[in-house]
Image (cartoon, rainbow, N blue to C red):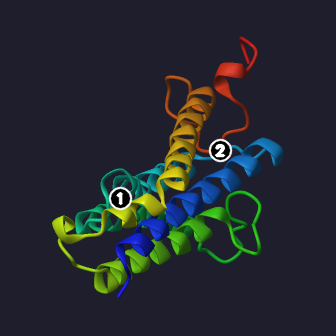
Amino acid sequence: MISHKTEGLLNVAALFAISAVLLVAFADQIFGGELPCPLCLLQRGGFLLLAIGPVLTVARGPHPAHYGVTILAGLVGAGFAMRQVLLHIQPGDAGYGAPFLGLHFYTWAFVVFVVAIAACAAMLILRDSTPAARRDPRDRAAWPAFGTLAVGLIVLLAAANALSTGLECGLASCPDDPVSYRLLAPAGS
């Protein structure tokens, strides 16, 4: 059985893990020069949706519904990632973007979404089901500082993704194979 204190700390750790995934994607975008395609952007959105459950846990305390939200978000994100995997499954297809540790980002995204779904299912099975009224209030005191930092990082990454997507796509549809930021390109190009 996982205590409420441990449950909260695991949710904070999940937020840091989601932030790490998004930061690696941004590092590749900024330092590697690989702009995200539309499906890549949807997967990033999926990771931000995946953060909703842990954010709710940090803000309101553990509740089974938070894992339901995360599982649904994981299914959506896994669907976007699998769509991209299937687009590049043909023999001889080099895939989109450079591989990272032997796999493309969209393959890693699928793996991470599936792991997140499995982790949520495990939490639903292993969590302490003591009603909130009977929980020790000190349990939540264990994670506020790290929780606030983790939520702040997710909010910052959401804003950075929105800004980056706006610069890349402008007010039009995002290009299938982006090579520049539309709003930063010289006029007439």
At a point 36% along the width and 60% down the height, the residue shown is 73
Above or below, 43 against 159 in this view is below
Which amino acid, by three-letter code, is at mark 2? Asp
| Closer to us: 59 or 15 | 59
Question: In the image, residue 58 lies at what x, y percent?
Answer: 40, 55
Other residues around mark 1 within 10 Å, as few (<14) / some (14–19) / many (≥20): many
Which residue shows up at 45% across the image and 72% down it? Answer: 116
Q: Which of the pair 35/17 is nearer the observer?
A: 17
Which marked residue is nearer to the observer: mark 2 or mark 1?
A: 1
Q: Is residue 44 visible?
A: yes
Give the quadrant of the C terminus. Answer: top right
> Residue at image x 58%, y 30%?
163
Number of disc labels: 2
* Residue on which the image places disc 2: 177
Separation of residues labelled 2 and 1 (CA atoms) = 38 Å
Residue highlighted by disc 1: 57
Q: What is the secondary structure assignment of the residue under circle 2?
A: loop
